Image (spheres, grey):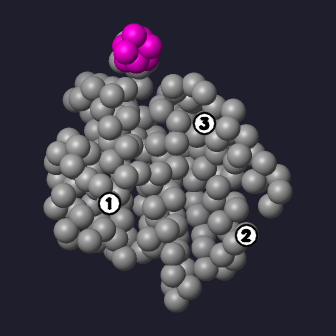
């Protein structure tokens, strides 16, 4: 527990970069999930998977963390075992290479009201005061990638919330936007 907490805290406090490698973010997520596994025992399970092609893609730090924490916070129940899955893979969408990140749990899912609000992520990010983590993540993705990054929220037909994030993996958009960030 001490080693996991130390790794988790080191990532939080020693990370002043605007972008991190996806493999670093997932290593941080795994520290967090191991702590939750110790905390909740048999009531909590997780699965992480990443393909080799997406390892070197850079993303804003703690983007995935926001949604993983929300799953633990809103889907955890001692009545049913929480299964949380984070899968990262490369894919080509409309001739653009992306790193696709899927965070999925088997909890109660998003409320119909929240899903309705999340249909338009731009409006949601500007007007939402209740789910600050989601709002901030949407804003950071838009700021870093303009309209190239995509985020989708829905409920799985098998129960549970699903968040899909598609981040351009070509690096060109990332370098351009990091430069813009430094100038602002």
Q: Is residue 24 visible?
A: yes
Distance of label 2 from label 3 (alpha carbons): 23 Å
Mark 3 or 1, nearer chain start:
3
Residue 151 belongs to magenta span: no
Tell me the quadrant of the picture where the N terminus can be found: bottom right
Residue nearest the viewer, comparing 99 with 143: 143
* CB atoms of marks 2 and 3 within 8 Å: no
Asked where in the image residue 148 lies, by quadrant, the reply is top left
Q: Which residue is mark 1?
A: 130
Q: Is residue 134 above or below residue 144?
A: below
Badge 1 element:
loop
Q: Is residue 151 above or below residue 19?
A: below
The quadrant of the picture occupied by the C terminus is: top left
Q: Nearer the viewer, residue 89 or 83?
A: 83
Give the spatial CA distance, label 3 vs label 1. 30 Å
Residue at the limit of the structure toward the bottom, as seen here = 79
Question: Are there few (<14), some (14-19), or many (20+) residues within 10 Å of tag 3?
Answer: some
In magenta, the rendered stretch is 177-184
At x 71%, y 46%, the residue is 9
How far across and how far down the image is residue 56, in percent?
Answer: 55, 26
Q: Is residue 59 above or below residue 40?
A: above
Gap in Å between the C-alphas at discs 2 and 1? Answer: 29 Å
Outermost residue to the right: 2
* Spot occupied by residue 14 in the image (x, y as percentages of width and height): 69, 33
Q: Main secondary structure of the magenta part?
A: helix
Relative placement, left or right, of 36 versus 139 is right
Question: What residue sits right under mark 2 in the picture?
Answer: 38
- Report the disc number at residue 23: 3
SS under mark 3:
helix
The label shown at residue 91 is none
Q: Is residue 32 left or right of residue 154?
A: right
């Amino acid at each position: 527990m001490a080693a996991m907490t130390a790794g988790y805290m080191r990532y939080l406090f020693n990370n002043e970069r605007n972008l991190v490698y996806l493999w670093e973010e997932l290593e941080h997520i795994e520290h967090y999930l191991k702590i939750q596994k110790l905390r909740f025992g048999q009531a909590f399970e997780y699965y992480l998977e990443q393909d080799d092609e997406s390892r070197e893609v850079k993303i804003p730090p703690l983007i995935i963390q926001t949604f993983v924490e929300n799953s633990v916070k809103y889907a955890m129940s001692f009545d049913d075992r929480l299964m949380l899955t984070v899968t990262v893979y490369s894919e080509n969408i409309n001739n653009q290479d992306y790193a696709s990140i899927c965070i999925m749990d088997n909890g109660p899912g998003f409320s119909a009201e929240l899903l309705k609000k999340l249909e338009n992520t731009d409006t949601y990010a500007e007007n939402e005061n209740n789910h600050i983590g989601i709002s901030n993540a949407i804003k950071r993705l838009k700021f870093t990638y303009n309209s190239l990054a995509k985020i989708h929220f829905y409920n799985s037909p098998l129960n549970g919330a699903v968040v899909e994030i598609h981040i351009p993996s070509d690096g060109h958009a990332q370098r351009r936007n990091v430069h813009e960030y430094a100038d602002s």
